[in-house]
Image (cartoon, helix red, strand yellow):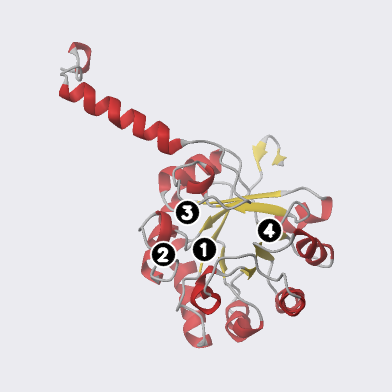
Amino acid sequence: MSVHGKPRIVTTHVLNEMKLRGEKISMLTAYDYSMARIVDQAGIDVILVGDSASNVMAGHKSTLPITLDQMIYHAQSVVRAAKRALVVVDMPFGAYQGNSKEAVSSAIRIMKETGAQAVKMEGGEEIIESMHRILSAGIPVMGHLGLTPQSIHKFGTYVVRAKEEAEAKKLVEDAKLLEKTGCFSIVLEKIPAKLAKEVTDNSKIPMIGIGAGADVDGQVLVLHDMLGITQDFSPRFLRRYHNLFAEISGSVEAYVEDVKEQRFPNEKEQY
């Protein structure tokens, strides 16, 4: 996807074009400049500044503790690195639920202070008023249905969502509602592949899956999970492309040993 040999900058419009021609969309999380630069140069379509930073960057057990200020800091770092990818920022827990006025001011802060291209919000009908306000301010919104980690205490578990008929029906209705309201794309997390296919086939906007099978318009994973930096999280949908935990550990151990045994620095490594 290039114009005169240069990589084409990804926009929400480009994602829609990709869905129309059946080209799959690649999406990964990033939270800092160095990693985002690598991911962007490797050709990723969308970078999600995920509230998963709460887990992988800050060490919290859930995504709930991360603040709007912290999300803005991470997003600023990522936007400085991204030259091609579309950068989407998660609206953190508490920044939009239940108060549409606060929701729009949170979204405006993200857009003004980071330079990102869109925000992402979890939920369907229950957050529609906040979503309306944000969209009416001219801010692109990516939806998120299925397993919504910000609602972990409501569900009490991270199991597959929408297996029962009532919940599956609500998800289908929510997807239609989000599309009608004006979302440019929706993440479908940890739902049956058959349901994800049904939603994808009946929508004009791209559906990005994470644990939602192959019949969606694109895929997203948490960067630290797919690189094997994190080791204590192994859901069925996660493919580890590397074991950076072992590789980095080995490098640090070798460095420690070289320092202790006075092998580093050597004569060539000093002035």
Q: Are marks 4 and 1 in contact (CB under 8 Å)?
A: no
Residue 233 image point, x, y percent: 49, 52
Q: Are marks 2 and 4 in contact (CB under 8 Å)?
A: no
At horizontal 56% and vertical 41% (from top left) the residue drawn is 240
Q: Secondary structure at mark 3?
A: helix
Q: CA distance from mark 2 to mark 4?
A: 23 Å
Residue 116 image point, x, y percent: 51, 61
Judge whether 170 appears above or below 61 on screen.
below
Q: Are marks 2 and 1 in contact (CB under 8 Å)?
A: yes
Residue 82 appears in view: no
Answer with mark 3 or mark 2, whichever residue precedes in sequence: 2
Answer with mark 1 or mark 3, whichever residue precedes in sequence: 3
Answer with mark 4 or mark 1, whichever residue precedes in sequence: 1
Residue matched to label 4: 208
Which disc number belongs to residue 79?
3
Query: The C terminus appears in which quarter of the rendering?
Result: top left
Residue matched to label 2: 72
The three-letter amino acid code for the residue at tag 4 is Ile
Which disc number belongs to residue 89?
1
Q: In the drawing, does residue 193 fall left or right of residue 119?
A: right
Camera-near label (2 vs 4) is 4
At horizontal 37% and vertical 65% (from top left) the residue drawn is 70
Answer with mark 3 or mark 4, whichever residue precedes in sequence: 3
